[in-house]
Image (cartoon, grey):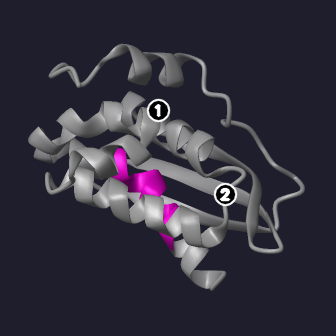
Amino acid sequence: MAENIYNEVLIDHNLHPAHMHDLPCATCSNDGLNPTCGDQLTLNLVIDNGIIKDGSFTGVGCAISHASTDIMLDLVIGRTVKEGKHLVGLFSKMISGSITDEELDELEEAGALQSIAKMPARVKCATLGWKTLEKLLDEKT
């Protein structure tokens, strides 16, 4: 992936987030906060019979935080809770710099955020949505 963290994928998801809206039919929600830079989000999911049917987020944050959360929702909607937890684990491995190429392929567009691993100050921004998702999914298992 490109060394510039503000690559085309990140910019597109920041400028045109498909999942940044209220979700009145959400079956579960959780708040996430990055006190280091002030990013705040509320993650909303519709989980039915163990499947993540829909998801959205609202809040304020930087381009990386918003784009990462939007990409994450693209990836997990339509998957099982177990698959969602697996993807959270892979994202965490990627950000820590310990992911294999095969695992990186599973992350699809989220792999575009791999270069953030080299910028410790931005890691919390990229992982905010993912950690919030992990808390929600842990509650569902």
Q: Secondary structure at mark 1?
A: helix
Badge 2 marks a residue whose secondary structure is loop
Left or right of 27? Residue 17 is left
**What type is the residue that disc 2 sits on?**
Arg
Q: Is residue 89 left or right of residue 28?
A: left
Q: Nearer the viewer, mark 2 or mark 1?
A: 2
Residue 11 vertical placement versus 25 (above, below): above
* Residue 63, horizontal then vertical, whole percent: 40, 28
Return the mark for residue 67: 1
Which mark is drawn over residue 53? Answer: none
Label ID, residue 79? 2
Assess disc 1: are there few (<14), some (14-19) or many (≥20) residues with their C-alpha within 10 Å of its C-alpha.
many
Q: Main secondary structure of the magenta part?
A: helix
Residue 87, horizontal then vertical, whole percent: 45, 58
Q: Is residue 25 above or below residue 39?
A: below
In the image, what residue type sits under mark 1?
Answer: Ala
Task: Write the start and end of the magenta stretch as one range.
Answer: 125-134
Image height of 109 relative to 73, above or below = above
Rendered location of residue 130, percent (x, y): 45, 57
